[in-house]
Amino acid sequence: MKSKKKFFIIFLFILLDAFLLVGYLVIRDKTNLTDLKKEINEINKLDITKDKFNRRIKTSGDYALVEKTIKNYLTDYSNGVQEVKNTMNDSRLTKILSFDNYTSDGFEFVESFKYLNSTKEEFNKEVDSLIEKSDKKYIKKYIDKKIKDKYYNDLCSELMITDERINSLGETKNTLESIKSKVNKIIDTSTEVLNLLKNNKDDCVLEDGQIKFKSKPVFDKYNELVNKIKED
């Protein structure tokens, strides 16, 4: 009897521990889910064009994986958008047709052409990548790659692929396409200007802080191209 009683008591303790463990896990899951939704609601208030999304992870376990997946995507996307916007304000690009640049690079414009070509290639590559990342299908593939467990995969999709976010990304995509068009126009037209000057360098003079022309047709073409850049 004593051995049976002892066994029964041990069994009760094991059962109690099991209930406590299950209770702890349930409470932990609910707390993690609450914290996750709260944190995602907070980052949804941030501006993709200027804010930072690499905030401290607030959850644990697989919930942390969901949180990291969302934040990593938004951080990568946001950094890309901000980098693209900065290209428009790049001082070297805005001053590529300045007297100082003409003077420093000379009428062969070796460094200027090199800069314009590399900037255009890198810029278009980044913009096209961001436009692709704006798509709902891309986001779903991104989640599928990062999270294999169905419950957490579905949870991540639920929190990440909302109508509000897809609409916001759609607006950003339109903005990116507009920026792409403007920057390419600036780069291509600037390249035309520099080629014009290079091919007619004997008709160009740098003096008194400005470029002067001996040929009226070259002068007219130069102004036409420069004004084309200023149209936007």
Image (cartoon, rainbow, N blue to C red):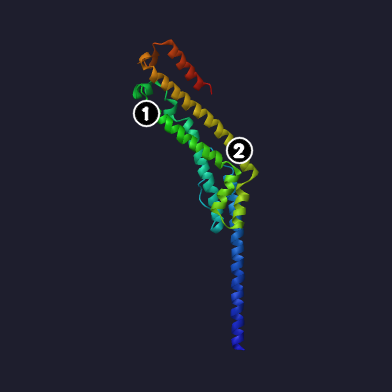
Q: Amino acid at mark 2?
A: Gly
Residue extending furthest front?
A: 199
What SS does tag 2 mark? helix
Could you say which quadrant of the image residue 166 lies in?
top right
Q: Is residue 164 above or below residue 14?
A: above
Question: Is the residue 64 above or below the residue 52 in the image?
Answer: below
In terms of secondary structure, where does tag 1 sit?
Answer: helix
Q: Front-most of 227 and 86?
A: 227
The image shows residue 60 at horizontal and vertical percentages of 54, 57
Q: Residue at x 35, y 24 (%)?
A: 105
Asked if residue 50 shows in the view, the reply is: no
Viewer-closest of 203 and 152: 203
- Which residue: 64% across, 42% down? 164
Quote the CA–CA distance across marks 2 and 1.
37 Å
Q: In percent of the image, x 55 and y 38: which residue is there?
A: 131
Q: Position of residue 222 (x, y in %)?
A: 45, 17
- The residue indicated by pointer 1 is 111
Quadrant location of the C terminus in the rendered image: top right
